[in-house]
Image (tube, rainbow, N blue to C red):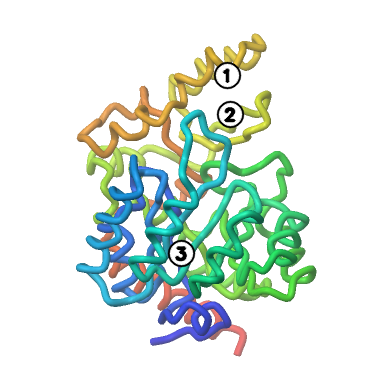
Amino acid sequence: MQIKTKATELLGIQYPIIQGCMQWFATADLASAVSNAGGLGVISSATFASPEDLRAEIKRCKQRTDKPFAVNISLFPSLNAVGYHEHIKVCAEEGVRIMETAGRAPTEYIEEMKAAGMTVIHKCVAVKHALKAQSIGCDMVVIDGYEAAGHIGAFNTATMVLTPSAVDALSLPVITAGGICDGRSMAAALMLGAEGVYMGTRFFMTKECPASAEIKQTLAENYGELDTYIGLHPYKNDTRFVLNSLMKELAELEAANAPFEKVGPLVAGYRTHKFTQGGTNLDKGSLCIGENIGLIKDVPSVEALINRIVSECESQLSRFN
């Protein structure tokens, strides 16, 4: 089986399926599994404390797959100084040929990445941001709908509207993100004009994702589409989290106009990182999950998941032939 699109041709992959970048979880283990199964795996550079730690992870991924994979550089505001140029340099030295950026347009980094022969994918939440990415030389855009996990922006535009709007406005290939989790939603994205799909929550819910098995099983058995919370809106950083007691505490602080200094510790990275260290108490963690968690009822291997999605997608598309 193969679904050919502009994305598969540009990225050199079998299926137009890209793994979402999830800090702490987008490691070589998950990325290599996705790439080996025909998609595009992505490593999160933000997970690693230094450029050399990132280099080691890239080497680990190359040991596990000979297929293309990408590295994500998240350009969101950070309390910790991040050496983006150093990360890009490491990626170039290690032969990474696909980079994903997010947070803001990679204006000051695009020349460096292109000089290294990299294909640059930019992820954003609005058509105007996608047009900016196109204007500076990015090769592909991931357009992130309101249903998505994590940083969703403040525009509240759902995937069904955002995808065709981006397709109409851009000459670049558009990849759909936000709510994609099965063959039906992949077929819908392709029918809307997308050249592929981008999935974070669905790949979080796989065996190869380095989150604790207990957390994944709890989500599969007990959480629905209403069990998420959009926090940090007062601080202009709208982010979708799994709904739990910690998020209810966050909501109370937001309603009281608390300064970010009081809010920040509730969403600090360690509260997510613990889920890779055997943490099983979902109620006390800060975890980004999309609305599509309500459609996800199992925790398969990456290979089984991708094969199932592709088969379902082909079946859905064949209904209209």
**Type of residue at label 3?**
Asp
- Report how far apart the C-alphas of labels 1 and 2 lie in the structure: 7 Å
- Residue linked to disc 1: 251
Identify which residue is drawn at 56% across, 65% down: 121
In the displayed structure image, the side of residue 217 where residue 191 appears, left or right: right
- Report how far apart the C-alphas of labels 3 and 1 lie in the structure: 31 Å
Nearer to the camera, 298 or 194: 194
Q: Secondary structure at mark 1?
A: helix
Nearer to the camera, 139 or 190: 139
- Report how far apart the C-alphas of labels 2 and 3 lie in the structure: 26 Å
Quarter of the image where one finds residue 273: top left
**Type of residue at label 2?**
Gly
Quarter of the image where one finds residue 64: bottom left
- Residue linked to disc 2: 231
* Labels 1 and 2 touching (C-beta < 8 A): yes
- Residue linked to disc 3: 182
Callout 2: 10 Å neighbours few (<14), some, many (20+)?
many
In the image, residue 85 lies at what x, y percent?
Answer: 49, 52
Q: Is residue 23 above or below residue 136?
A: above
**Type of residue at label 1?**
Ala
Kindly report which numbered mark, 2 or 3, lies closer to the viewer in this rendering: 2
Ranked by sequence position, the earlier of labels 2 and 3 is 3
Identify which residue is drawn at 54% across, 15% down: 261
Assign the N terminus to one quadrant of the image. bottom left
Q: Is residue 59 above or below residue 85?
A: below
Nearer to the camera, 296 or 81: 81
In the image, residue 318 lies at what x, y percent?
Answer: 54, 85
Callout 3: 10 Å neighbours few (<14), some, many (20+)?
many
In the image, residue 183 lies at what x, y percent?
Answer: 47, 69
Callout 1: 10 Å neighbours few (<14), some, many (20+)?
some
Identify which residue is drawn at 55% across, 56% down: 101
In the image, residue 29 lies at what x, y percent?
Answer: 25, 57
